[in-house]
Amino acid sequence: MGGPVILVDWGTTNFRAWLATGPGVPPEQIVSDGPGMASLAPGEFPEAFSRALDPWRSGSSPVPVYMAGMVGAATGWQAAPQLPLPVTLADLAGAVVPVDGFEEVWIVPGVRVPGEAPDVMRGEEVQIFGAFGLTGRRDAMLCLPGTHSKWARVEDDTLITFTTSMTGEVHAVMMAHSLLGREASGDSGPLGAAFDEGLAAGAGSGGLLHQLFAARSRRLFGDLGPDDVRPFLSGVLIASEIAAMATDYPPGDGEVLLVGSQTLRGPYERALEHFGYVYRWIDASDATLRGLFDILQCRSGGR
């Protein structure tokens, strides 16, 4: 790393940026709540980028920028490829895409599971390698909860497989567009008995679709109050996700690196304990920042 660099996480709902000035110096967050991809028309991406970062790039030698997330999707600013597995940190570093019309601005590629049953990832791959940089691990299972939750396996510093579940999106759709959601209160409150009951139901018999309808039945004739709907539904969906992952990512395979936000930390820690997993939590922002920094270091020969 020969000078300052800007590291950007540009996703669907947010734009965040940090200024890194050198090894051993904690990066400074310079943008915390910029516009996400979903709030911009395609032609507005360059202007939004410049408005956010020009104060740090207005000199004769613009500060380099490395970006990860949905900025590289087909619906983002400029498409970056999704590399087929297996993938290493060096593979990501070697395939960054320069942004047309901007000097020293790069987008990190995503990754994909090739074959007849493809799966895709964009942004989480940076968090995965960042989590390994933070922990010093070379092998691990990972759980990355979110709108589209990911479970992944890394062996010998190589991402070899991952699986996506639409856990967060299904929860949002159910709350916004289903009969169950209409009867829920706006505030889910702290985790409690309703979440635990949802975990038990989601891990039980009948399957996810039955348990979703059972939540409606319990609301009508059981003990599920308006304040209980959100946590119960969260428990059902998270339990269904983890139960489905247990074959390919079994609890007995060692510690799971749980990479997520503070908001999702509590529910997933409780659910992982319910299913017998040993876990270690890592803040998603810290993982993103470390992953981008390590990609930069790899490109500059520092790793």
Image (cartoon, rainbow, N blue to C red):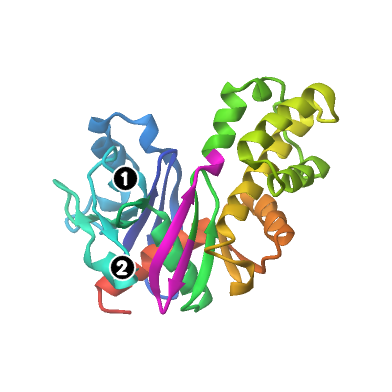
Pick the front one: 294 or 216: 216
The magenta-colored residue range is 152-168
Magenta stretch: dominant secondary structure:
strand
Q: Position of residue 9 (x, y in %)?
A: 40, 51
Q: Secondary structure at mark 2?
A: helix
Label 1 – label 2 distance at C-alpha: 18 Å
Identify whether 225 is placed above or below 50.
Answer: above
Res 115 visible: yes
Q: The N terminus appears in which quarter of the rendering?
A: bottom left
Q: Secondary structure at mark 1?
A: helix
Q: Position of residue 198 (x, y in %)?
A: 74, 42
Pick the front one: 40 or 125: 125
Res 25 visible: no
The amino acid type, in three-letter code, at marker 1 is Val
Residue 138 sits inside the magenta stretch = no
The residue located at (59%, 29%) in the rendering is: 174
Q: Which residue is mark 1?
A: 71
Q: Which residue is mark 2?
A: 296
Pick the front one: 246 or 70: 246
Quarter of the view holding residue 275:
bottom right
Residue 163 sits inside the magenta stretch = yes
